[in-house]
Image (cartoon, rainbow, N blue to C red):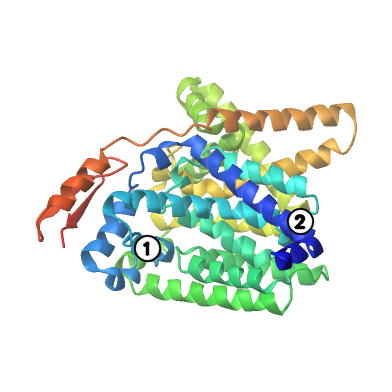
Amino acid sequence: METNRAIYSHNPSGRRLLYVHTIMFLLAFILIISRRPDAILNPQFWAEDGTVFYAQTYNNGIINSLFSPYAGYLDAIARLTAAFSMLFSFKSAPLVFNLIAIIIQILPVNFLISSRFSKLIPNINYRIYISFLYLALPGCYEVNANITNAQWRIALLIFMAIISKSSNFLVNLFDILIILIGGLTGPFSILIILAILFLIIFEKKSNQKKRINNLFYIKLVLLLGTALTQILVLTNNQIGQSRISKIGSIFLSFNDVRKILEILTNQVFSMSFFGTHITNYLINSLPESLYIILNITLLIVGSIILFYLLLKSSIELRAFIIFATLIPFTAIALEFPHVTLFEPVGVGGRYWFNLVLAFSLGTIWLCYKIYSIKTHMAKIFAVTILATMSIGIVTDWQHPAFTDFKFAKYADRFMELPSGQEIIIPTNPEPWSMKLIKH
């Protein structure tokens, strides 16, 4: 006891930091649950969570499923979560999946408020505000509290782990673990490499050494290793080969370009300001001529903001914008010519999540710069933009609850089945279902 007191008395800042991290974690947990309480109160599997990851792990065994590609690439975090859930009862499995997904969702908050980001954003209050924006972001229903789409959150974590800097051994070890597991979760490591190369080139041109150090290169080599692994899996997998082959056959017509720009405007610019519900209302309710005018206006304004950010913002934000932009446009290229798959607002939001976050962060940074001009008109303009952005946060706060398929009853029925019998369990979203064969 005396020893502990002595440690705390000599390291009050460390103890305070632990309190801050704990409080922020709990607050973030509460905010996430407030957006969709049934994730904890009535947990159910979402899409591949049950249909693929849990079902394959249970039916085929942990070892056989652990390194199995899905959709053409490895998804380590989903496979590890399914393996871990085998330690618990089947009835508890959806809760285990959701809790791990929520922890992953919260981790960027703890990353951001840690000392590793103090040089990039010195003011802790600003880092807390950014954390709230991240947690409150509109249009993120698909990436909220489920493992299947946690890979888009992990992609953000990998980027943060690469650009952050710390002298603490345990912190660096944790960052390396994030990069290793995250790099084998989805194909994002391939895209992050391109953004990090941009960061390296421009930091060297500006003679900055903020990130370029031996540990940075260790992280980069590890990330490169995971990217090459994912490329090998993609090129040796039938689904991966099919997707990659589409890229070489892309020929964009004027109509394709127009449709892609319209999708970008609705899914990023309009989403960032107005959120899902109001964007859908504008699309479905406005007269066509008025909608076209609004869409073109948002496209011009949003594009100007993005180009300004790419020219004038910090190197780290520019690199993040590049990475975040690569995600949806790579997905569109892989699905081409089926561009309309990305058209419905609120559906496929996972592809746009990081770009909406990057654009929102950049817009807030720009508003801060404009407000600092200290003229009356500049302050009114900045406050107006920020107030407009709050519309999407408020209207998109509450996510719709999952359809209640009475998972607990199916779980009880499954446990009563004799060995060798199978059961089909409906899961969200309809018409997904999972098939389990009782051991």
- Single out the residue that lies furthest toward the front: 2
Residue 117 x/y as whole percent: 73, 59
Earlier residue among tags 1 and 2? 1
Residue 244 x/y as whole percent: 40, 65
The part of the image, by quadrant, that contains residue 164 is bottom right
Residue 427 x/y as whole percent: 28, 44
- Badge 2 local density, few (<14 within 10 Å), some, or many (20+)? few
Residue assigned mark 2 = 314
- Badge 1 local density, few (<14 within 10 Å), some, or many (20+)? some
Q: CA distance from mark 1 to mark 2?
A: 40 Å
Residue 392 x/y as whole percent: 58, 31
Q: Mark 1–mark 2 contact, CB under 8 Å?
A: no
Dot 2 amino acid type = Ser
Q: Is residue 78 visible?
A: yes
Question: Is 53 left, or right, of 256 in this rendering?
Answer: left
Q: Is residue 329 visible?
A: no
Residue assigned mark 1 = 84
* Residue at the image position 52 percent from the left and 77 percent from the top: 225
* Quadrant the C terminus occupies: bottom left
The part of the image, by quadrant, that contains residue 58 is bottom left
Secondary structure, mark 2, is: loop
